[in-house]
Image (cartoon, rainbow, N blue to C red):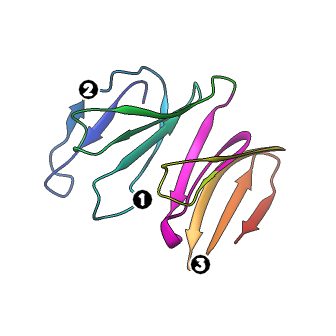
Amino acid sequence: GYGMVLKTADGGFNWNALSVPYGGYFKSVFFPDNNDGRVIVSGFKGMILETYDGGINWNKNFKDKKVEYLEAAGGKNDSVFVVGFNIILFSSDKGGTWEYNKNEYAFTDIVRHNNSYFLSSDAGGIFKIY
């Protein structure tokens, strides 16, 4: 929802709202690694946020106000993809650095299945990368 990230510590029975200092409509939450504690939140207004301490402190990982990010996925060899309107961001180091790839598609979703990633677009296309 708008400016809200929720956290559970008991399997979803109880939820607490985290204080996120950057407003915006958040669309996706992604955990690149179960071990390092990083959480990546992407959304409208071109922001990708990250936290290493369970949501107490947040950092802007990437920002481009001209882009709206809709979904994030990853896990294969520390890779992370974030897709949105006319954009694919790729990181090979769990979101530490990003490669910026503009295109003509408005990607609405990305899903990892086995060793491949599948993207869908608002024009009805499905694409496979990797």
In the image, what residue type sits under mark 3?
Answer: Asn
Which circle marks residue 19 in the picture? Answer: 2
**Element type where label 2 sits in the image:** loop
In the image, what residue type sits under mark 2?
Answer: Ser
Which circle marks residue 9 in the picture? Answer: none
In the image, taking residue 36 as reference, residue 89 lies left or right, namely right
Residue on which the image places disc 3: 115
User: Residue 25 in the image: x percent, y percent?
Assistant: 49, 27
Mark 3 and mark 2: Cα distance apart in space = 35 Å
Q: Dot 2 surroundings within 10 Å: few (below 14), some, or many (20 or more)?
A: some
Disc on the earlier residue, 3 or 1: 1
Q: Dot 3 surroundings within 10 Å: few (below 14), some, or many (20 or more)?
A: few
Q: Residue at x 69, y 24 (%)?
A: 66
Is residue 27 a member of the stretch shown in magenta? Answer: no
Tell me where the magenta segment starts and ends, as one range. 67-89
In the image, what residue type sits under mark 1?
Answer: Pro
Judge whether 103 appears above or below 59 on screen.
Answer: below
Disc on the earlier residue, 3 or 2: 2
Quarter-wise, where is residue 126 in the image? bottom right
Disc on the earlier residue, 2 or 1: 2
Mark 2 and mark 1: Cα distance apart in space = 21 Å
**Element type where label 3 sits in the image:** loop
User: Residue 127 in the image: x percent, y percent?
Assistant: 77, 63
Q: Residue at x 47, y 57 (%)?
A: 94
User: Residue 85 in the image: x percent, y percent?
Assistant: 72, 38
Residue on which the image places disc 1: 32
Q: Residue at x 25, y 38 (%)?
A: 55
The nearer-to-camera label among 2 and 1 is 1
